[in-house]
Amino acid sequence: MADVLTPEQRHRSMSAIRSKGNRTTELALVRLLRELHITGWRRHVKLPGRPDFAFRAARVLVFVDGCFWHGCPRCYTKPGTNRRFWADKVTTNRARDRRQTRELRGRGWAVVRIWEHELKRPAAARRKLRLVGLDPATQL
């Protein structure tokens, strides 16, 4: 079926859509943090890249990266349409992630990036959190 809107109308319509965040993946991490009795985190902090979770006392930032949007090497699948657009989009997202991680580390933060799929079987996410000292035994 043909689109009833002109390309310009479609562009304006799609540009008006605003993200509400990666809510389901963030909530999965909230459950994991609570399950592990890891405390001291805050959400919605105003830092470059808008980290999903910040542990200010420990100087740790956690990002939950969606496998599709950030091009997970394990489970990203290329869309069937607009391949060039999506390839460029994911490449840009990954470059931005690297740039922001570098900047935040330069400011003295430890940065942890957890893939969306790691929250389905959380052993890998637990390991990443423990590597930066986020373990109930080491909480401040």
Image (cartoon, rainbow, N blue to C red):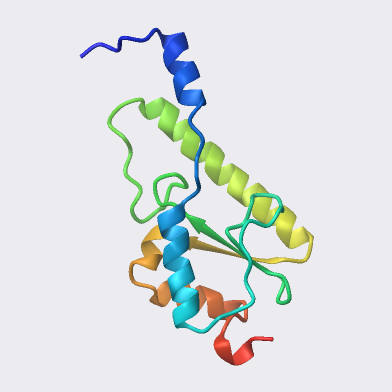
- Relative placement, left or right, of 81 versus 93 is left
* Residue found at x 62% / y 81%: 133
The quadrant of the image that shows the C terminus is bottom right
* Residue found at x 49% / y 34%: 89
Q: 102 or 123, which lies in front?
A: 123
Q: Is residue 102 above or below residue 41?
A: above
Q: 48 or 140, which lies in front?
A: 140
The single residue placed furthest to the left in the displayed view is 1
- Relative placement, left or right, of 41 versus 93 is right
- Residue 115 in view (yes/no): no
Quarter-wise, where is residue 45 in the image? bottom right
Q: 129 or 92, which lies in front?
A: 129
Residue 57 screen position, x and y as percent: 73, 76
Residue 65 screen position, x and y as percent: 48, 54
The single residue placed furthest to the right in the displayed view is 107
- Relative placement, left or right, of 63 versus 59 is left
Residue 54 screen position, x and y as percent: 65, 66
- Residue 55 in view (yes/no): yes
The quadrant of the image that shows the N terminus is top left
Q: Is residue 125 above or below residue 106?
A: below
* Residue found at x 46% / y 67%: 29
